[in-house]
Image (cartoon, grey):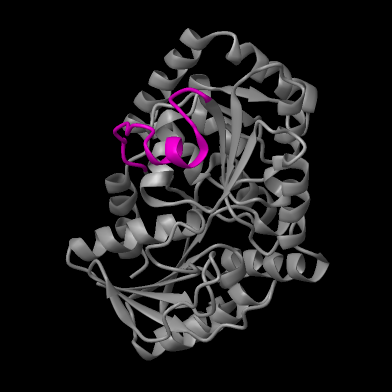
Amino acid sequence: MRIAMIGQKRTGSREGGIEVVVTELATRMAALGHEVICYDRSGTDVNGNPAPTEPYEYEGVRVVPVRTVDVKGLAALTSAYAATRAALKNRPDVIHYHAEGPCNALPLTARAGVRTVATIHGLDWQRAKWGGVASRVIKRGERMAAQKADALIVLSRSVQDYFQSEYGRETHFVPNGVDIAKRVPADLIAERWGLSEGSYLLYLGRIVPEKRPELLLEAFRQLDTDKRLVMAGGSSDTSGFYGEVRACAELDPRVIMTGFVEGRMLEELYSNAYLYVLPSDVEGMPMSLLEAMAHGRCCVTSDIPECAEVIAETGAVFGCGQVANLRAVLESLLGDCRHVASLGRAASSRVSTKYSWDSAVTRTLEIYEGVQ
C-alpha cells in the first residue's frame, strides 16, 4: 500500500507528540513492506536549525519537505496544502492527515477521489496559544475532518464522545503506543545539573499556556522540600510566554529549566525522576505521559479526561487549574516514597498491557483497508 502522511513538522523528531506518533507509525508500516511518504514542513526546527529542503530517506520512509510559510498560525495550514498537492501527484492509496489544522486541505483530496484518514490528536482550537483567527481556522479543519474524511481516528474516549455529540460522526478509537523503557543511570544530568536518582520532580513538555507550567511553579514554590523541579521543554509559537515562565522559575533556586531535550539526556530525566507532573488544561493523548509511565514513574496530572483515563488508578490527579489541590497532592506524595514507587510500578504494568505500537499500527492499517 502507498501511504502519505501529512501534518507533522519533522519525521524522526521529538518536537511534539504528533512527530513521535507519525514517526512510529510510518517506520513500522515501512518495515511491514508498505510504501510510506511523509510530507514535512520546511523552515527551522525547535532549536532554530534549518530543516532539510530536499527529499531523503529515514528508516525506510521517504521524507519530502514542502513549502511552508513559517509564521505563527500559518505553518501547519500552508504546509498542509503544499503537502496535499505534492501527495496527489504521487497518487497514494490513502492520505493520512494528523491534527485538526492540516485537515483544512481535505477538500482537495476529496475532489481528487483519493481516500483519506484523519487522526485528531486533540481539540487544538481550544489551545490557549492560538488567537481568535487561528482558532477559527483550526476549528474549520476539525469540521472538514468530520465532514470529509473517509475515516476518523481519535486518541481518547472523551474526544470520541465529542465528535458523536458535535457532528454525529462515528470515529475509531486507536490510542497511541509506547515501548517499555529500561532505566538508565543519572550520568549526563548529574554532570550538567547535579541531579541524582529521585532528587527531582519532572515536567516534560512544550512551555505553552494550555499545559499550565506556571501553575506547577506556583504549587512547587509553596512546598517545603529539598527536591528540585526540572522543567524540560521548549516553546511552540509562544516565545513571550516562555520568557514569562523562565522569569518565574528564576525566583526559586530549586527550579531548573533545561530547554528542549532528547536522546540520552531525555532518557536520564525520565529514568531518575521522583515523579512526573503534567498540569495541562488541554491535551490529546500526551506522549510524555505514556513515556513517563513506561519508565515506571509515578505520574500526577490534572483531572481532564484525556489524562485521567490514561493513568487510571496508577497515578494521582488534581482538580484542573487548582493550585492548592496540586500542592496538596504533591505534598502527600513527597511524604510517601513507598506509595510513589508502587504507583510507578503499576503505571509501567498498565502501559505494557494497554498501549502498544504494534496494536496501533495493525488497527490503523485495518482502517486504511476499510476505506479502499
> Which of the two residues, 311 or 194, is positioned nearer the viewer here?
194
Q: Characterize the magenta stretch by its predominant secondary structure.
A: loop
| Residue 190 drawn in magenta | yes
- The quadrant of the rendering that contains the C terminus is bottom left
Residue 291 visible at all: no
The mark tally for this picture is: 0
Give the camera-side residue of 274 and 124. Answer: 274
Depth check, front residue: 319 or 105: 319
Q: Is residue 145 left or right of residue 327?
A: left
Image quadrant in which the N terminus is located = bottom left
Residue 287 drawn at (x, y percent): 47, 45
Magenta span contains residue 327: no
Q: Quadrant of residue 336?
A: top right
User: Which residue is drawn at the image coordinates 27% and 47% (left, top)?
Assistant: 358
Q: Which residues are magenta?
A: 178-199
Q: Find residue 180 and report its horizontal and vertical position in percent.
A: 31, 35
Residue at 77% over, 22% down: 222
Q: Quadrant of residue 143?
A: bottom right
Is residue 277 something that shows in the picture?
yes
Where residue 128 sits, quadrant-wise, is bottom right
Residue 29 location (% of width, % of height): 26, 62
Q: Give the residue furthest to the bottom.
A: 89
